[in-house]
Image (spheres, rainbow, N blue to C red):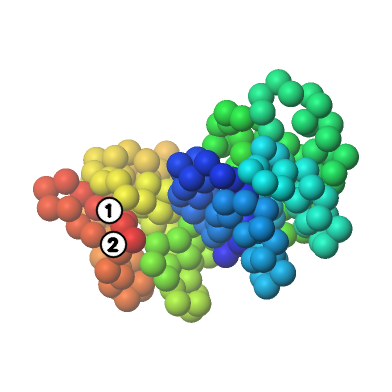
Amino acid sequence: MLVIDYVEDDLDMAQSVAAFLGLQGYTVRCRADAAAFRLAFEADPPALALIDIALPGEDGLSLLAWARAKAPRLPIVCLTARDDPAQIVSGFAAGADDYVAKPFDPDVLLARIRALLRRAGLPSGGLLTCGDIVLDEAAMTVTRGGAAIPLTRAEYGLLLLLMRNKGCILTRARLLEQLWDSGGRFVSDNALTVAMRRMREKLGYPPCLKTVRSFGYRLEE
């Protein structure tokens, strides 16, 4: 999975963003200040950096310029205070590729990240994980423990819905409503049962896939 380093001194915000991006298939390493980022960067550079401009101690602009000098091709997003043109201009001058103003919508941040990764020639995301299961939406592939798992279209669609709603119970009724075939017909209840059983078999009965009796199914870490 692609690694993102997120430099943010607001712990609650850092954890919230990291959790959201984690569900999109990214590994997010939160750094509370510039020193922590520098130390980790030297040992293991990320695929992309999110740097808050307003950091304690060394400011984000200085850190951004340092990261750009260290890695000229590293995609960098600076996070700025809302309606502060001076910070935005300074961020670009220091080497940022894009900016997101606080407070921001997580989906907007995700879109900016994916756009920068595409421009850098890196996988732009779409990797969904649960345990050692990885679903690549772009390639439409599924692996477990690194081994490819061949799934039928129905099985893949079922796993995709579960992956996108990890941690939530999906009722059989909801799965039936959303699993359309190319002819516009609903998948039958029996077909859903068969697809679930075969998918579980192919995945080696993963412990993260739960049956919630009388309700439906859920994927959980």
Could you say whether the residue bearing mark 2 is in a helix, strand or loop? strand
Residue drawn at (24%, 53%) of the image: 217
**Pick the front one: 109 or 135:** 109
Quadrant of the image for the N terminus? bottom right
Q: Farthest residue toward the front?
A: 57
On screen, residue 154 above or below 95: below
Kindly tell me whether residue 219 is visible in this rendering.
yes
Could you say whether the residue bearing mark 1 is in a helix, strand or loop? strand
Left or right? Give the position of 201 relative to 63.
left
**Circle 1 crowding by C-alpha within 10 Å: few under 14, some 14–19, many from 20:** some
- Identity, as a three-letter code, of the amino acid under mark 1: Arg
Residue drawn at (37%, 47%) of the image: 165
Residue drawn at (55%, 31%) of the image: 105
Q: Farthest residue toward the left?
A: 214
Left or right? Give the position of 66 relative to 20.
right
Residue 71 appears in which quarter of the rendering?
A: bottom right
Q: State the image coordinates of residue 7 (x, y, percent, origin top left).
A: 62, 50
Residue drawn at (78%, 56%) of the image: 67
Labelled disc at residue 218: 1
Which residue corresponds to mark 2? 209
**Circle 2 crowding by C-alpha within 10 Å: few under 14, some 14–19, many from 20:** many
Kindly tell me whether residue 152 is visible in this rendering.
no
Left or right? Give the position of 95 relative to 46.
right
On screen, residue 51 above or below 44: above
- Labels 1 & 2 near each other (Cβ < 8 A): yes
